Every structure is written in C-alpha cells, then in structure tokens.
Image: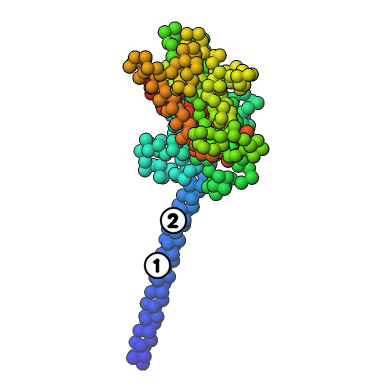
Amino acid sequence: MRVCLESNFSNNMSRIAAARRRHMLTVTSTTDDRRINRNENVTISAAAARRRNAANSAGRTSGRIDQRKGTGRGTVPTDKDTGMGTNTDTNQEEPSQPFVDEIRSEGLTFCGFDTKRQGTYQKDTTEGRFRALYGTSSLAAAKLHRDLHQLDEAYRISKFKLKYFFMTLYWLKAYPTYIHFEAFWSTRFTSIGDLLKIYVKAIQQLKDLKIRWFKEGELHDDDIFIISVDGVHCRVREVRKDPGTKWYSHKSHGAALTYELAVAIRQDRLVSIKGPYPASKNDLTIFRCGDGDKNNPQPALKDKIPDGKRAIADSIYRPEDGKTVSITRRGDSTAVKEFKARAKSRQETFNRRIKSFHILATEFRHDISHHQMVMEAVCILCQYDIENGHGLFEV
C-alpha cells in the first residue's frame, strides 16, 4: 500500500514537472516567436522604408521644388522653395543655397546616385558628378530653373516637372536614344519626344536674356578689339529631301550645319549667334551677308560692329582685315600677336564647351528643322555656366 502511494505520488510529481516544462517551453517559444516576429517586422519595415525612400526621395523633394502658389502645381514657384523674392529682375535675384543643394541632390538622384551614396562623397565630387551628367554647375541649373518659371505666360511651361527638366538637360548632354530614356527614366517611349521639345523650346526662349549685343555704354572708347568670331560645324544626317554638296563639311567630311558665334573679349558672354546654314556656306559670306549672299546681302554681324572697332578672327576673314576684322599679321608686335592668339584660343574654348554636349558633337539624329532650337539651348546653358563660376579665361 505504501509503495503504491509513493509510486503514485512520484508519477504525479513527474507529470506536474513535465507539464511545467511544457508550459515553460511554450512561454519561451511564444516569447521568442514574438521577438523574432517583432525583429522581422522592424527589419521588413526598415527595408520597405528604404525602398520607399529610394523610389520616392526624388518625388518628395521635387514635389517641394515643383510646388507652386495657388492650386498646388501651377506656374510660379514659392519664395520658400526658391529662396527668391517677388522681384522679377533675374539679374538681382540669387537662389538660396539650400535650393541649389536640393537641385544638385535631385539631379544626382534621378541618375542613380541616391542620398546615401551622395553622403559618402565630398561636395566637390558630387558637383563634378552633376556637371558630368548635365553639363552645367548646380548653381547654373538652379538659376535656369528659376528663369524658366519667370518666362512670359505664353512660353512658360504650365505643368513644370523637375524630372522632365533634368531629362532635358541630360538629353542635351548625353544624347541618349529614347529607348534608354524609357529604360532608365521610366518614361513612355511615345511621349519622350514631345516632352523634350517643350522644355528645350522653353530654354530657347531665354535667348534674348542671355545672348545679346552690347548695350549703350558697355563699349569703352579705348577698346578697339571687341569680339572674336568663328564658324562652328555640327554634323547631321544626310538631307534626303534636299540632297546636294551644299551640306558637305570639310571639317567632318559629311553633311553638317554651320553657325556663326561671336564672343565678347572684355566680357564673359556670347553676344551673337547666327545660323544654321549649309556647311558649305563660307564663314566670310555669313559675316558679310548674313542669311543672304553677295548678290542679296542681309543684315549681318559686320553691320553691328561700330566704326573704329574690330573683330578678331582667323585668316579666312582676310578680305575684311583692317575694316571690321583684324587677323594676325606679320607686322604685328609680339604683344599684339599674343593678344590675338589668346582671343582666338578663348573663342575655341567656348566652341569646345558647346561640343562637350554630345548632341552637338555627334551626328544629329532628328530632323534638321529642330537643330537651331537645340544649338541655341546649348549655348544658353553654356552662358549660364560661364556666369556662375565657370568663366572663360581673360585675354
């Protein structure tokens, strides 16, 4: 009897201990499961947040940059977003540094440099990345962005998108195909051409603001040499609707268009651009006759040069030497020869800058009727860049 009771007691105690162990295992397992699930949720939430940040960081900031007064996305940027007052004199307004930094950050984000990667670079490195992608400094891009919003209402982009703004700059700089845009910029193939045309045409409308002749009082009496002038050839596809040798360029050995560019010697700016013309049209003919020829001369750059002033040019302008042009002569003093050489080298520097935009350095794939719009837009971008920390050297 006693042995049986002890046996039953021992069995009961074993069952109680086993139940307690099962209960402890269940509690521990439940606690561990909760901790694991909580950690997984935190990890998943963090990963999701990172994905959202990577996907939408441009949208959030570009939304702030694109934000407008009135109905959320109208036409005029707010003072808070741009750091600008209500004064419309673009020569006196300066974008705030935070706005310039946002422009740089968003431009890099659109091309795959997320904010985490940007944080690992020095500021000069990020600025170099921005210039390599868009062809200008971030300050120049910020001022361009500002001025596009101050265009007359007839030319202003009604629904301005920061993404399309950067797409346009990237297209001018890198000249990718529409398939590349569709793949890397998540834009519909069929709408890319229309979007680019809208934004390039808007940039072109700033021509009168950025590319202008001298105003009264800007030329000093003791300045004899006021500009340098040269012709630039840009390659195009064979013109099937109007074939002929007039398109042949001796520089590119193929079809091309030519433009006449004049750069001020005492100022850092382009003062005149004329064209396009078939590449066979001589630089001297353009300088003398403009859109016409010797039998039908039209207003030309030659007519703008005041009496007693000269343009520095290469030997192709020799017939005008001593009249409106001055070329390098054997009788020139060493100082004058060096001055003229530096002026022509400075002109070539500007020519190289516009050719750093791939759209002008390679064969133009689109209809030549759009080339003038592109050329003038690139010259305007270079002018913005010259005015904002990337000037030409002094003569």
Observer-nearest of 371 and 208: 371
Tag 2: residue type? Answer: Thr
Residue at the image point whose x is 51% and y is 33% from the top:
250
Quick one: which residue is furthest to the top in this view? 221
Can the viewer see residue 270? no
Q: Is residue 293 above or below residue 39?
A: above
Residue at position x 58%, y 28% in the image? 277
Disc 1 residue type? Answer: Thr
**Badge count:** 2
Q: Quadrant of the N terminus?
A: bottom left
Residue 270 in picture, x, y percent from top left: 49, 22
Give neighbour class at mark 2: few <14, some 14-19, many 20+ (Cα, 10 Å). few
Residue situated furthest bottom in the rendering? 1
Identify residue for label 2: 43
Label 1 neighbour load within 10 Å: few <14, some 14-19, many 20+: few
Q: Secondary structure at mark 1?
A: helix
Q: Is residue 97 above or below residue 331?
A: below
Q: For the point 60% across and 42% down, which residue is it? A: 192
Q: Can I make out residue 40 in this image?
A: yes
Q: Which residue, given by chain and number where applicable, does mark 1 sit on?
A: 28
**Residue 105 in which image quadrant:** top left
**Quick one: 126 or 200, which is closer to the camera?**
200
The C terminus lies in quadrant? top left
* Residue 285 x %, y %: 56, 22
Q: Position of residue 69 (x, y in %)?
A: 59, 29
C-alpha span from label 1 to label 2: 22 Å
User: Which mark, by number, is residue 307?
Assistant: none
